[in-house]
Amino acid sequence: MTVQHPIPAAPASKIPATLSPGRLLTIENLTVGFNGVRVLRGIDLTLARGEALGVVGESGSGKSVTWLAALGLLPKTAEVSGSVRLDEDELLGLHASRLNRVRGGRVAMIFQDPSSALNPVIRIGRQIGEVLARHQGMSGASVRAEAKRLFDLVGLPDSARRIDAYPHELSGGQNQRVMIAMALAGKPDVLIADEPTTALDATIQAQILDLLTTIRKETGMALVLISHDLGVVSETCERIMVMYAGGIVETAPSNLIFETPRHPYTQGLLAAVPPFEGAVERLVPIEGQVPHPANMPTGCAFAPRCSRHMSECEKIVPPLKSIAAGRASACLAEEGAQAERHSSPIKSMSA
Amino acid sequence: MTENIVELQAISKSYATRRGLFGRRVPVRAVDEVSLSLAKGQTLALVGESGSGKSTTGRVALGLERADTGCVLFRGTELPAADTRAWRRMRAQMQMIYQDPLAALDRRLTVLDQVREPLDIHEIGSASERNDKALAMLGAVGLNASHAGSLPSELSGGQRQRAVLARALIMRPELLICDEPVSALDVSIQAQVVNLLMDLQKEMHLSILFISHDLKVVRQISQRMAVMYLGRIVECGDTKDLLANPAHPYTKALVSAVPVAGGRTRERIILTGEPPNPAARPTGCAFHPRCPVARPQCASVSPAVTTLSNGRSVACHAVEIAPTFMGAEA
């Protein structure tokens, strides 16, 4: 199901995103700290059934930590608080044995480097068989038949023979297909893909993104695609969430965020990417660098690098506020700019 | 015609690899009859996927690897053999930077020490002059005196790459070979380093061989580009023209696979199949098993490089047949 969910004009609350009855996953005020240093500073988001959400951010933005924390995959030393609910079931603090039924089952996750996620000394057919036995209760010949069906589904060539291959006998793109097949083996409601194509070549990346879209259409599962590449999420996802220094700065439908980015960071990010069409002009980088988590500015984390920086920005952490239907931005300057916008249309960015 | 700073003439390079732990040694042709030339003060981009031989080509151009056949001309004269005195003298004129700046820097030396080191080795000027020179170079790449006293671990990724750049440029080389220099950097920082590289090129009249898989950055930085596939150049020409009108079917797929934020204006070509193994190179045209326009001849005859009317060179049977069609677009 890939319907655009109607978004009620959010009340003054801080929860901007979809609040439709098809809500699958709800994250409220999720924070993560390591040794007293907060790296995730209160994330609120909801994911609808069947939705494709793109999460974009640079290194240290917290885009991966959000999902690792939600699934209890962080080391024990991490201080996690807040709430993560799958339907009505709280996942945070859930006992490992019950969490294991969710992970790999209703929620699956794949990572950047497939060859390090797979066990190098076990044949891929047996590795996927483990998932099928654990989550589907299959055994014997049915495991092999289902493994072959899944390998065919993800387009692994010559699947009948490849079932007995070791990961090193496959290419990076093929191993990522195996990972996706293993993720699908638990019949997940949501697949969380953390930079799934970053380690792959361009033509193979195109194949894998195409595959994710096809599978989503066929199975109706939701997809969370985490990437540093705006282009990658733009083509695969319906809704985009931009993160910076451990917080969400903007969320919007995919088509709108690239036409009319609202948050200065999103605007800066789009302007920094060399365009692939039109005249070549000097790039506009975002000056400065991401603040260190232990050394976070008091107000808005982006203020020191922001072109629309005001004095209040140094005092107040801007809340994520609804600015239009389905759109939210965490910027103080945005509120003042809202009125002018009617007269001066925002320059559209081609990136 | 402008002078060429470096010229590769039909270079080939093979490595031996074993099939399995105790297997027979099999030669792998990493680079196969590659000819390229880089004009003075210009940037030539070398693009291709992993295993295409683009890094090996860069290393051969620098003399770090000796080509099995063919020759490398630097300013019109043949590059001396590696590790000879003549080569070492020439090496001050040609420098290389890599993707991972942390691996390229010494973790226990301050940034200033590392940037000054080439001057120390070549014994240029007095000790205090060297220090001043190194500090000036750091200033030119946007690092200040407080960065100079830092260890690499105390700098961010972008700052480290600036330090690497300062060290490479301190001997005022004429040729800079960059192997994926901005791939590991975040987008906002990548733009800073790309701008810096272009500014320094103008100031120092640098010639750059820019090895990358990122076509957006290549479009930004280079005047000419060459596309490699399994050790061979399949297409070469003016960057903007080549990316706007790719002629080779592989280049077409590569260009269409570039993820573009916002509306997509061209249709994406999804190639079937996996990138082939360099150790098991297909016969004929290496691209034919994945090629959407392959014909029977492609499986047996390797296509020769043809030059089209617009100065573009392409190695493809399908293009050879309709050169006028391609020329019309120029």
Image (cartoon, grey):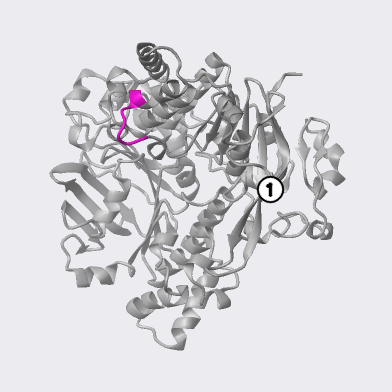
| Quarter of the image where the C terminus of chain B is located | top right
Nearest the viewer among B156 and A101 is: B156
Note whether B126 is above or below B268 in the view shown. Answer: above
Disc 1 crowd rating (10 Å Cα; few below 14, some 14-19, many 20+) is many
Q: Which percent across, then down, holds residue A174?
A: 53, 63
Element type at marker 1?
helix
Q: Residue at x 26, y 60 (%)?
A: A71
Q: What main secondary structure does the magenta stretch of the protein show? A: loop
Magenta-span inclusion, residue B294: no
Note whether A155 is above or below B143 in the view shown. Answer: below
Q: Which residue is mark 1?
A: B250
A191 lies left or right of A281? left
B8 lies left or right of A29? right
As drawn, the residue found furthest toward the front would be B85
Q: Which percent across, then down, holds residue A241?
A: 35, 43
Q: Which percent across, then down, holds residue B139?
A: 38, 16
Nearest the viewer among B236 and B321 is: B236
Note whether A173 is above or below A59 in the view shown. Answer: below
Magenta-span inclusion, residue B109: yes
Residue A104 in view here: yes
- Magenta span of residues: B106-113
